[in-house]
Amino acid sequence: MPDKILFVINKTSGENNNDWQAGIEAYFKGKDVVLEFYHLPDPVDCNSLDQYIKDAKADKVVAVGGDGTISLVAKSVRGTPMILGVIPAGSANGMAKELIIPTKLEDALQIIDSGRQTYMDTILLNDKHLCLHLSDVGINAQLIKNFEEGDTRGKIGYLKVAWKTIIRRQALEVTIKNDDKSFCRKAIMVVIANAGKYGTGAVINPEGEIDDGLFEIVIVKRLTLWGFLKIMLSLGFDNKNMEIHQTRSVNILAKHRAHFQVDGEYIGKVDKIAAVIQPKNIQIMLPEA
């Protein structure tokens, strides 16, 4: 029986007008595979998508879009025999960069077709949100909210809202309960990290591995204007302003409600986050090591 591959395409992702389906069909022409396509409606009906993926009974399910699209598809394939694939088609493509998946369609499809099959961890947040990449509470989540509400897209729009967000930044007061430890910190943001770097390329978590059964709590104590420029230039964060704790679970309690995002999706304001690792519960196609 030939492999069946379902492509979930988000045509609103990113800033391009590629005919993804035509490119995919051209690549697989003459190959012994069965292709199926699902074009995400706007707005997305998550329940309908989940049911469609489960009914399709595909061997591989490929997210064609940005981090949000990958997260949607991942929620349906986790804990099943279906294998997740990624075609980067978003603006930042943070998760694809983390996984070293190229943006050129033909190269990404080669990984789907004949790459390395492996497992990755996920993090369950507050018993309902699935984190594949990076989640945080504080200034970055606020920046994402401001960007979504702004009227300018792309890097110009990002810079515009980032400047205002940095100027108006406020520190968090948090209590972090990790295994048998409990400690308090003042910080500009707290990151729950399954991976290593943001979509800009800035490394926030040098210890990040997606398959080690652990995740990291990264406490960013300060963020200066120069520190922000370093992030934008993909030069990373100032290590002297960071503190990293490795764990399998954590509870974060904030003195005041603060902005919260999961894999680039703004969730809202929260005053508590419970996070627990889910080891190797997603199969994924990656480049050959």
Image: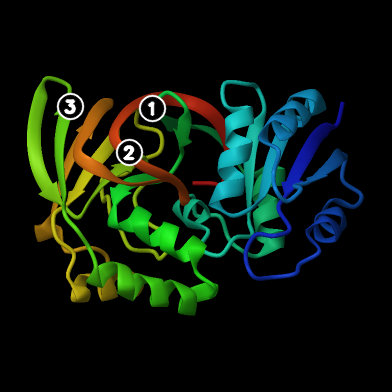
- Mark 3 touches mark 1? (CB < 8 Å): no
Q: Nearer the viewer, mark 2 or mark 3?
A: 2
Q: Which residue is mark 1?
A: 126
Q: Is residue 138 visible?
A: yes
Q: Which residue is mark 2?
A: 270
Q: Is residue 199 visible?
A: no
Residue name at image x 8 percent, y 37 percent: 184
Tell which circle, 2 or 3, labels the residue nearer the N-terminal end: 3
Q: Nearer the viewer, mark 3 or mark 1?
A: 1
Residue name at image x 17 percent, y 44 percent: 244
Kind of residue at badge 2: Val
Q: Quadrant of residue 88?
A: bottom right
Residue name at image x 84 percent, y 51 percent: 28
Answer with left or right where residue 217 lies relative to residue 37.
left
Answer with left or right where residue 43 lies relative to residue 189.
right
Residue closer to the observer: 174 or 24: 174
Kind of residue at badge 3: Asn
Q: Which residue is mark 3?
A: 178
